Amino acid sequence: MPAFKLPKLEYLDIGYNKLEKVNDGWNGHANIRILKTIDNKFKSLTQFKAMPQLRELYMANNAVTVLGGWEGMPALKKLHLRRNKIDKVQEEELAPLE
């Protein structure tokens, strides 16, 4: 997925594309509030760093193996990760989420 500049973008749905990674030029997006990446091949949340306004992240049916990586997402309230490859959850990984 290439880097792009859309400063007013608040909702992004890139689901059902079998994407594996974002471009090295991806620096997040300051105003995105909802991101849907359902049914892709992302392995971690760190792909979507630097998104301070992100409130909802939908990553069902990807290849995520561990929690964590949302340090650049301080507003995150909803995280959907069903049908991933997470086999163990550490309590400290959940601490930032309400």
Image (cartoon, rainbow, N blue to C red):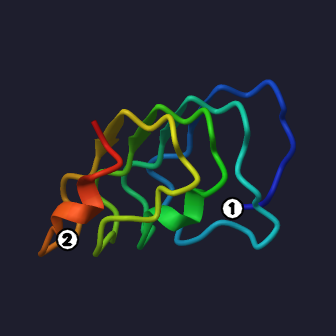
Check whether the beta carbons of the residues at disc 1 and disc 2 lie within 8 A of each other.
no
Residue position for label 2: 86
Judged left or right of residue 73, residue 7 is right
Q: Position of residue 23 (x, y in %)?
A: 73, 69
Image disc number at residue 29: none
Q: Position of residue 86 (x, y in %)?
A: 19, 71
Q: Nearer the viewer, mark 1 or mark 2?
A: 2
Disc 1 packing (10 Å; few <14; some 14–19; many ≥20): few
Of 39 and 28, nearer the camera is: 28
Determine which quarter of the picture holds residue 47: bottom right
Identify which residue is drawn at 80% across, 24% down: 8
Q: Where is residue 13 in the image (x, y as percent from the top left)?
A: 54, 37
Residue type, mark 2 in image: Ile
Residue position for label 1: 1
Residue type, mark 1 in image: Met
Judged left or right of residue 65, residue 57 is right
Q: Position of residue 22 (x, y in %)?
A: 65, 66
Regarding mark 1 in the picture, which secondary structure is present there? loop
Identify which residue is drawn at 73% across, 28% down: 9
Above or below, 44 against 34 in this view is below
